[in-house]
Image (tube, grey):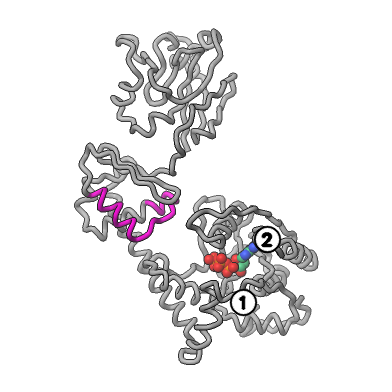
Amino acid sequence: MAHSRKSKSNSLLGDAEAVLLAHIKPGDHLTIALSGGIDSVVLLDILAQLSRQIPFTLSAVHVNHGISRNAAGWSNFCSNLCAAYGVSIHVASLQIKKEAGVSLEAIAREERYRIFSRMHADYVVVAQHLDDQAETLLLQLFRGAGIRGLSAMPLIRKQDSDTAPQILRPLLEISRSRIEAYAHKNELTWINDESNDDTGFNRNFLRHEILPLLKKRYPSYPKTLLRTSRHLSEASLLLDELAAMDSENCVVSGLLQVERMRKLSFARAKNLLRYMLSQQGALLPSTAKLEDIVNQLLSANKDNRLHIVFGHSEIRCFKGAVHILPKQSSPQDPEQCTWQGEPCLALRHLSGSIRFTHVKDQGINQHKLSDAPVTVRSRKGGERFMPACNRPRRSLKNLLQEASIPPWQRNTLPLLFCGEQLVWVPGIGIDCEFQVKSGETGILPLWDSA
Ligand SMILES: Nc1ncnc2c1ncn2[C@@H]1O[C@H](COP(=O)(O)OP(=O)(O)OP(=O)(O)O)[C@@H](O)[C@H]1O
């Protein structure tokens, strides 16, 4: 741990302080993402000192991925280190499951950022530095990434939800050698992840075998590559702006319209779809898959019910509109829930909830509901329904078709039954027999789907 006083001018401490002063407000809460490796240990030392000078609260988070057999030891190390600094730490333990086609590291990283996004803090501070940025750019180049994948890591990244902390990287312009020099000079202790030396991993191969050679010929390549990746970030931003403009013309009621998309060049249509997928939090498909999807969309006619599955998402086309959805699990027997008068009924299997409010002149007659158990389940087929008292009872299938409810949504609508009688269908109405009379107060269900 650092005990000597460090000169701030022209020092790592001074550089990090300048970043913090430019971005954080007095009283902000910063949580350092502490892996126990040299970079985050140095960052902890710096932040602990700065927290005594700048008014911010400091805490730490460590994620135990449970992958390495040393994982428990790393967690203990981080807890003890934080105790020595008087910094509180949250240790999150995970059991990561391998998924086909995705590396364990990628899953660990995704889970880690998910945990970061749930921290109660203004910023989660991570320790990536200049050399990490250069390595990431090169690795992405070798994967054939596009402009977005090659873009620089931002110094500050806002996370998707407004309540999630922002990600702050104060060491992003600091070289690994300066970080190492700081750690040695201040006699810090840290953990060496044994896998960092394994050149079977692409990043380690690059770091140990290729970059030392590059450094001989281009000593300042990390700074040069940072410049390149910042140019690419700017280009990526411009492409997003173009997509946002195109979406104004091509999106109606939140849905991309194939007919309007056809007026764009192929590259712009691809850019627009990529933008919409990332806006909806979908994992982006490969370049070849994205091109295939755009080709299929552009050649689909209005009656074509296109259905394309990729990653955790699916694209469906209905009446010329493109629906981007989370991948739906294969249909099971409809699950049934009982409603016992609670104001909100959460239906996790249908990804939503029904809110029940009391409204005058509208809704379901409460007394009628007391005749039999009230249950909610999705469609089995064969249901009949009479939402308008002046029209005959009809098949629910016809009513849903007439209301232009896309076919895949028809089987996941929550239907409210009293005994065996269908009472309410979201988007369609309340059965005539159950509707309140004028002057009465009824129960009005509202379907909130996630
Ligand atoms: N297990 C962990 N617990 C808490 N923070 C961690 C953990 N692992 C990494 N971090 C934080 O993330 C930073 C980057 O770590 P690393 O370079 O290993 O991540 P990465 O997988 O390359 O992620 P990225 O793609 O964001 O660079 C670390 O400096 C540290 O601040």
Which residue is the site of mark 2?
62
Q: Position of residue 329 (x, y in %)?
A: 46, 39
Instruction: Answer left or right for 5 relative to 205.
Output: right
Q: Quadrant of ligand 1?
A: bottom right
Which is nearer the eye, 352 or 443? 352
Kindly state the secondary structure of the residue where label 2 is placed: strand
Which residue lies at the image location 49% right of the left edge and 72% below the top edge?
136
Count of numbered circles in the view = 2
Q: Are marks 1 and 2 in contact (CB under 8 Å)?
A: no
Q: Amino acid at mark 1?
A: Asp
Which residue lies at the image location 65% right of the left edge and 70% below the top edge?
40
The numbered mark, 1 or 2, whose residue comes first in the sequence reads 2
Ligand 1 within 8 Å, label 2 CB: yes
Kindly state the secondary structure of the residue where label 1 is placed: helix
Q: Amino acid at mark 2?
A: His
Which is nearer the eye, 50 or 158? 158
* Residues at marks 1 and 2, CA–CA distance in whole angstroms: 22 Å
Which residue is the site of mark 1?
197
Q: Main secondary structure of the magenta part?
A: helix
Give the class, few, some or many, for how many residues have Cα within 10 Å of label 2's Cα (few <14, many ≥20).
many
Q: Image height check: is 366 above or below 292?
A: above
Q: Image height check: is 228 above or below 423?
A: below
